[in-house]
Amino acid sequence: MKLKILSFWWEAFSSENVVSATMMTGIWEITALDNHAPLLTSIKPSTMYVVYIDDKDIERRDDFAIWTWVVEISNNSVKIMADMLVDIDDLDVSKAERAREEALKLMEKYRDSKDKMDMEKFIEAEDMLLRSIAQLKLGSTIK
């Protein structure tokens, strides 16, 4: 099965020999395998697991923190467009923890505001929180 993960700026991951790709959709976790039924759905901030055969015919697993957007599965091909994709090898756990703490502070500030709440800023803080949680979840898989 083919897998391409794209962001707005580059092709983040690509393989022609994917065994499985597991991710959280808007409704539930799915694992795409060969001959998967066609599907177009949203993805949620989560950890994504990709099992593939490398150039030396060795089965490998790569783990990513992934952010929202969309996945299309058809004809033994999985295409994912994501706002964020962090490979486990590039993960900075302390940076993700700082982002989580900052997001929580901002959300509390906006929630407790005596004036009218700025929903746009609250949603941005919530997005920052969800991104950091996805990365911290990925970090918890490091042994």
Image (spheres, grey):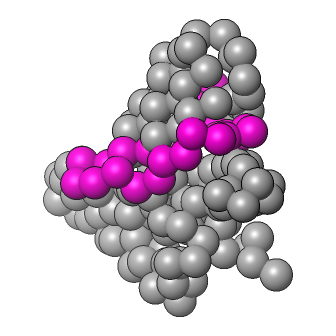
Residue 33, horizontal then vertical, whole percent: 73, 27
- On-image quarter of the C terminus: bottom right
Looking at the picture, tell me which residue is in the foreground, 131 or 81.
Answer: 81
Residue 22, horizontal then vertical, whole percent: 70, 41
Horizontal arrangement in the rendering, residue 16 relative to residue 62 (left or right): left
Residue drawn at 48 percent across, 65 percent down: 86
Give the residue at the far bottom of this rendering.
94
64 up-or-down from 22: above or below: below
Looking at the picture, tell me which residue is in the foreground, 120 or 132.
Answer: 132
Residue drawn at 53 percent across, 67 percent down: 87
Residue 1, horizontal then vertical, whole percent: 64, 30
Horizontal arrangement in the rendering, residue 131 relative to residue 32 (left or right): left
The answer to whether residue 48 shows anywhere in this view is yes
The answer to whether residue 39 shows anywhere in this view is no
105 up-or-down from 75: above or below: below
Residue drawn at 42 percent across, 77 percent down: 99
Residue range (magenta): 5-27
The answer to if 8 sits in the magenta stretch is yes
Residue drawn at 76 percent across, 70 percent down: 141
Looking at the picture, tell me which residue is in the foreground, 122 or 111.
Answer: 122
The answer to if 4 sits in the magenta stretch is no
Give the residue at the far top of this rendering.
37
42 up-or-down from 123: above or below: above
76 up-or-down from 131: above or below: above
Horizontal arrangement in the rendering, residue 127 relative to residue 61 (left or right): left
Mostly what secondary structure, the magenta segment? strand
Give the residue at the far front of this rendering.
56
Residue 121, horizontal then vertical, whole percent: 22, 57
Horizontal arrangement in the rendering, residue 99 relative to residue 60 (left or right): left
